[in-house]
Amino acid sequence: MISIFRKKQKWAGKLDLTNLPRHIAIIMDGNGRWATRRGLPRSAGHAAGAENFRTIATHCKDIGVEFLTVYAFSTENWRRPEEEVSAIMGLLEKYLGEALEKMERDRIKMKFFGEIEALPERLYALARRTEEIGARYEGFQVNICINYGGRDEIIRATKSYAEDFAAGEALELSEEQFSSRLFSAGVPEPELLIRPGGEKRLSNFLLWQAAYAELYFSDVLWPDFGTEQLERAISWFQGRNRRFGGVTK
Ligand code: IPE
Ligand code: IPE
Ligand code: MG
């Protein structure tokens, strides 16, 4: 117990570790601009972004965040030039392969949100294997959104509900029922949603789940959004007055 406490102290600067968000969601944006500013190809920005993902995921685990959901590739990102899309898919495969080893060592549970069946075959197989291995673990969970769109997720859930209903199942359509048909079934809603990269929009991310998330926007580009930036976001979150439609206590 004491050693865990010490480890947290070492990492967590001035954060109040008794009031951490259980679930943080991040739109990992700004990789392309990060690279362009350095005269590098956009793919170099995606590689730097993937490295930063590792840093941030590790830090979340170390300080005691329970769930981290990251937006890696949206249903709209297929509109990008083929060369960029295939560079991103290649990087996802590389990092996932490496993450698999670390995950087994650190017992991290990893899940995928999105239509992963549509991904290149090797990446799909890797994602599936990663999920299978992670299913054995309890504890810190990372959800990676690939080929994910909030609207697509809502339509999928609606279709699955309609199918069961048509098959004669007596179903109640409650918020809880509906949530259990989303990719995020069983995962608590994100309390803090972070978007680095300067844009102030959701870009189709967690439309249902983010209904009451605190939204933190930063101009820092994702590859530069390090542990200090993360702690700044969490510290901002800790100062929020969350009312959920009620009044301040
Ligand atoms: C986010 O960075 C990564 C993906 C969307 C795959 P971008 O590639 O969108 O970077 P910018 O926004 O163009 O700088
Ligand atoms: C959102 O970023 C998607 C991901 C980070 C994966 P985009 O760069 O695609 O979003 P827009 O185009 O600026 O809205
Ligand atoms: Mg972008």
Image: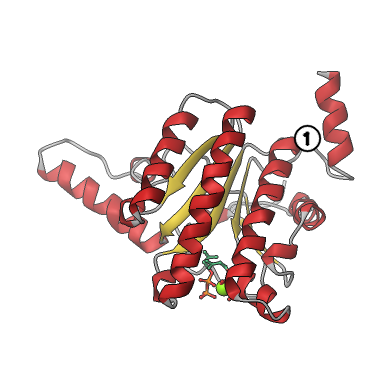
Residue drawn 84% across and 31% down?
A: 7
SS class, disc 1: loop
Residue drawn 74% across and 61% down?
A: 225
* Position of 141 relative to 30 (above/below): above
Quadrant position of residue 216: bottom right
Residue 29 in sight in this render: no
Identify residue for label 1: 18
Q: Position of residue 181 (x, y in %)?
A: 33, 44
Residue 158 in sight in this render: yes
Residue drawn 42% across and 43% down?
A: 126
**In this view of the protein, which residue sits in the foreground, 138 or 51?**
51
**In this view of the protein, which residue sits in the foreground, 40 or 141?**
40
Q: Position of residue 137 (x, y in %)?
A: 53, 25
Q: Position of residue 37 (x, y in %)?
A: 72, 80
**In this view of the protein, which residue sits in the foreground, 3 or 122?**
122
**In this view of the protein, which residue sits in the foreground, 196 or 213?**
196
Would you say 69 lies left or right of 207 here?
A: right
Q: How many marks?
A: 1
* Position of 190 relative to 203 (above/below): above
Three-letter amino acid code at disc 1?
Thr
Quadrant position of residue 5: top right
* Position of 199 relative to 204 (above/below): below
Quadrant in which the N terminus is drawn:
top right
